[in-house]
Amino acid sequence: MALLKYKTEPVGNESLDKWELLGSGGFGEVYKVRHKDFGFDVAIKILRDGVCPFIPNEKALHNEADHMKEASCEFVLRLYALYHGCPPIRETALQQGIVMEYMRRGSVQSLLDYLRGPPPWPLTFRLAHEVALGMNFLHIKKLIHHDLKPSNVLLSDELHAKIADFGLSRVSTSALNSNRETTGVDGGSYKYMPPEAFEASYKPCRAFDRYSYGILLWSIVTGKDPYSVADYSLVALRIPMGDRPDLEEIDQTKADGLEEIVKLMKSCWDKTPSARPEFKECLEVTENVLSKHRKGIRVAVNRILKRLESPTSNEHSETFSFPHQRLERSESNDVVDVGFIATQMSSMQDSVSVPAERMIDADKAKFVDEKKKTLIQDVSDVMAVVDELDDMVHSETYSVIEAEKTSQGKMRALYTRTLRSGGEKVKAAFYDALKKHQPHLVERLGG
């Protein structure tokens, strides 16, 4: 296929250096590469043959490049050129790829995984707003993304959101004159797919993206994967029946504007496609909520960047736990000077915790009791923690815990058989072991 649409020639190996494979999967490979002429790193995506059903590999790449070029804006990943050559770190035939921005901060998904929970509130609300800005721009350009999820929202050096992965994007063929905007190709990630998408006759429309945005909002606010233990068959059965992510995971009193965000996500995942708000309507909500937290953004971002650059710095003295009070504002809706620092701290979801060595056993035991529900859900390396307790866990109990198939089951058994009746000493020992093996979880919960 000739590359006549592009003013510049495809980039070849002679312009590229320092190839590094960033990731691979069913879609193909993504490489980090230094562009010799540009003087900075770029990312090159090469699709695997057959990744898009019924579309030849070369055409799929050109479609994705066309859509990226059409959707070029501040909140969408930038396209630089097409690639034509053989990646030197793999023995392959001549291939074509897309040369695009390299986002060294990863994705929203990788950030949530690293934090083991949600970002500080100002960053949470900024991400929500910037994703809505990017998606609104795509829809204005008559494009459907069709695969919106945390791993497809990449992060700039300053943690701004950029929408990526247009492999499933299609032009909305009837966007100008009909509500029936078809793409002709099914796809997407099933946890972010709307109920109607599980029907065999479904043809995607822009309401697909609006539903996905609602689920993505829930993921960012909670820091969790929706339906974490459900496989495709269960999701495909239950979502059309009305199941949605658990809103009990969200305490709507913990941040100013959070109630509005929860209301928005519920509107976006409405079972009726036509009832889901347009992204222009979403922007009105997210911009208003973000305006209440702007003064905390720089501090929040700097704290996250510091942790990303130096993962062990201040590890035992800071946490990103949810505050229990709303922001207090004056009658003029401006933050009073006296309360500015406190407002920043609240809007960051940030609090200073007492170092573990200074906490008395009673405080540790109180933490273990109060956080029971969350700990049962979120502790992953249970047996490592149990091993630290040594003879505090009876040998019979150890066998029962070990026999449980899930982390949640192991934690329930530990609480039932040991922690419930173990007293402050045992609970304090459990706290110390948890702090050792899952420090970020303890920090997130304010311990």
Image: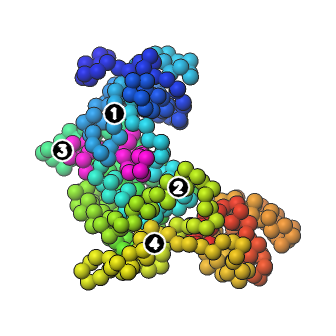
Q: Position of residue 282 (x, y in %)?
A: 27, 60
Label 2, label 3: how many angstroms apart (C-alpha)? 44 Å
Residue 39 in sight: yes
- Mark 2 or mark 1, which has the lower sequence index? 1
- Where 29 falls versus 446 (above or below)? above
Query: In this figure, which residue is indicated by the disc labeled 4?
Result: 345
- Say whether residue 232 is left or right of residue 181: right
Query: In this figure, which residue is indicated by the disc labeled 2?
Result: 306
In this rendered view, identify the residue nearer to me: 193 or 316.
Answer: 316
Q: Residue drawn at (38%, 51%), measured in percent from left and top?
A: 160
Amino acid type of disc 1? Leu
Query: In this figure, which residue is indicated by the disc labeled 1?
Result: 79
- Where 292 falls versus 103 (above or below)? below
Q: Is residue 177 found inside the magenta-colored segment of the image? A: no
Query: In this figure, which residue is indicated by the disc labeled 3?
Result: 175
In this rendered view, identify the residue nearer to me: 419 or 405.
Answer: 419
- Mark 4 or mark 2, which has the lower sequence index? 2
